[in-house]
Amino acid sequence: MILNSTYYQTLLDQYQSYPTVLSDLDEQIARLSLKMILNNCRQEDPIHINFQSRSQTIMEICRHLFVELASDIYINYPDLPSDYQIGDKLKRIRDKKYYEAIGIKEKGYILKELLRRNQRNPSPSTLPNVSYESLCKGFVKISTETGVRNTTIKNYFNFFEDINKQEDEVGFLKIYFERKCVFIARKSFWDSLTVKTKIPSVYLPNPREESDHNEIRTIPALPDCIMYVTPKYEQCYQQILQQKKKIKTIVFIDTEEDKIQQVLQDKNRFGFNIIILSNSTIPIKHNSIPCWNWFNEEIEIVNAL
């Protein structure tokens, strides 16, 4: 433990200009810790941050980290659908109409308009020869029968454009992603994430402790997600990693400490990074994961600078 204010001021200066998409963390120690975590993420290095009896600080950092990592996936790992199939339901963004793919020809896809319940048009329109590129640019593939509200899609795209201060430049709608992130956290963390309705996210319940075993999707109509949250690493391993879904980062929030050794072995196999945030007087440390153990005396100094 170092109790020299000059040392901590130098540390703050080092990370002062480090970019974040959100800037509303109240505590200096929370802002500094978040930037330290993001710096290690950018370099794909693991990191362990421990606080002592400051669970609320950890939760605030993790709620911000959820948005930061989601933004990274949205910007850097958008993907194209492998293909479209006959029977796929799609919504055209321009006119908010729904279509179904009813045929595939050499020049493109044939789409037939799906009329809504209150529409009485006896001759729904047909779009011939819609190219794969046009589908990727102007249509959202819908994974539910009920469709999706235009405001839901608009809020989703606007959310990421607003926090990143830029418009979409990839040339296609970002609804598929090559990689995702996973948070291993108690359900109370999931429940506290008010922003998750704007980020395609999936909660995988712990079947041993929760009565409802069904996954929860924040935007059910979209076919893919950016973030996963689950209380148990076992669920992550079985339902995500073993299903060959590519994960960039797994974040552990003050739980499953006894699983980290197994996780380190899986890290080499599946290629993900590890972030640990804990709230312990004596944290469990691992040789291959640098641990920054904040003592309360240090926190008081940092917050006062």
Image (cartoon, rainbow, N blue to C red):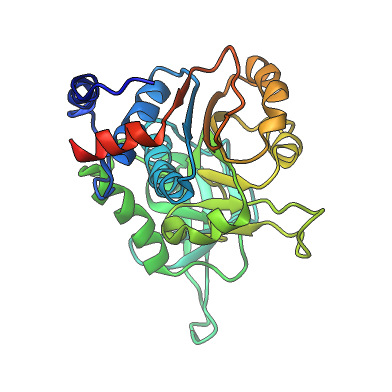
Up-down relation of residue 43 to residue 238 (above or below): above
How many badges with numbers are in the image? 0
Q: Quadrant of residue 239?
A: top right
Up-down relation of residue 12 to residue 147 (above or below): above
**Quick one: 229 or 26, which is closer to the camera?**
26
Looking at the figure, which quarter contains the N terminus? top left
Q: Position of residue 190 (x, y in %)?
A: 55, 55
**Quick one: 219 or 210, which is closer to the camera?**
210
Identify the residue at image location x=62%, y=56%.
187
**Quick one: 20 or 47, which is closer to the camera?**
47
Up-down relation of residue 195 to residue 266 (above or below): below
Q: Position of residue 255 (x, y in %)?
A: 63, 41
Up-down relation of residue 221 to residue 3 (above or below): below
Identify the residue at image location x=52%, y=44%.
227
- Quick check: 189 left or right of 34? right
- Quick check: 205 left or right of 126? right
- Quick check: 74 left or right of 302? right
Identify the residue at image location x=68%, y=37%.
256
**Quick one: 182 or 275, which is closer to the camera?**
275
Residue 145 visible somewhere in the drawing: yes
Looking at the figure, which quarter contains the C terminus? top left
Q: Position of residue 3 (x, y in %)?
A: 29, 23
Q: Position of residue 143 (x, y in %)?
A: 60, 57
